[in-house]
Amino acid sequence: MSPEQMNLEARVEQAENTPNVAIFVDVQNVYYTTRQIHKRNFDYNQFWALATHNRNVTQAFAYAIDRGDQKQKEFQNILRAIGFEVKLKPFIQRSDGSAKGDWDVGITIDALEYAEQADIIVLVSGDGDFDLLANKLRLSKNKRVEVYGVKALTSASLINAATAYYPIEGALLL
C-alpha cells in the first residue's frame, strides 16, 4: 500500500471516529448574563474553537431576537461567518412596556429534532427551563449534553442535568 493510500485510510478512520456535535446558543441569555455578571461580552470565536475541537459540526444554531438595527445585523453576520445558522424572532414590545422574545420552545424542538445526527449536544444558556431537555437528551437519547453558562446565573437543575458544565468566564469573554 502506498503512503498516500495509508494516509487517506487514516484520515477516513479518524473522520469515522470523530464525534458529531450540534450546537444551540440562546443569544439573549448569554448576552444578558455575561453583561450582568462579568460586564463583558461572550467570545463566540473562542467558544466555537472549544466546542468544535476534534468534532464534526452537524448543526450550529444561534437563536436571537430581531430588533432590526444595523449593529445587530452586523453581529448576526459575524455569527454566520463563524458557522452559525442564525434564527430570528421579531422583538415584541407589550403595551405594559415589557418585552417578549423567548426561544425556549424553538431551541427545544430543534435540539430534539437534530439529536439523532449528533453524539454531543452543546447548549449555551443558563435557563433552568432547559433541564428537562438536557435530561431527555442524556437519558432517553443517550447523548452527551454540554452546557455553557454564566455560573452565578445558571440554574443548578440545568447544571445537574448536563453531562458536563462549562462556566462562561476567562477565555470565553471579550
Image (tube, helix red, strand yellow):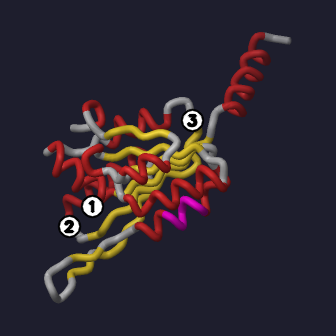
Closest to the camera, between mark 3 and mark 1, is: 3
Q: Residue at x 28, y 31 (%)?
A: 171
Name the one closer to the observer, 129 or 103: 129
Question: Which of the 4 image quarters holds residue 91?
Answer: bottom left
- Residue 91 among magenta residues: no
Could you tell me if the residues under marks 2 and 1 are in contact, i.e. CB atoms within 8 Å? Answer: yes
Amino acid type, residue under disc 1 in the picture: Lys
* Range shown magenta: 108-112
Question: Percent position (x, y) of residue 101?
Answer: 31, 72
Looking at the rendered structure, which numbered label has been put on residue 55?
A: 3
Q: Earlier in the sequence, mark 2 or mark 3?
A: 3
Helix, strand or loop under label 3:
loop
Question: Which of the 4 image quarters holds residue 26?
Answer: bottom left
Which quadrant of the figure contains the C terminus?
Answer: top left
Q: Residue at x 53, y 46 (%)?
A: 145
Between the residue at mark 2 and the residue at mark 1, the CA separation in whole angstroms equals 6 Å
Residue hosting label 1: 73
**Residue at the bottom extreme?**
95
Callout 3: few (<14), some (14-19), or many (20+) C-alpha neighbours within 10 Å? some
Q: Is residue 19 above or below residue 31?
A: above
Question: Percent position (x, y) of residue 121?
Answer: 54, 48
Relative placement, left or right, of 104 versus 30 is right
Residue hosting label 2: 69
**Residue at the right extreme?**
1
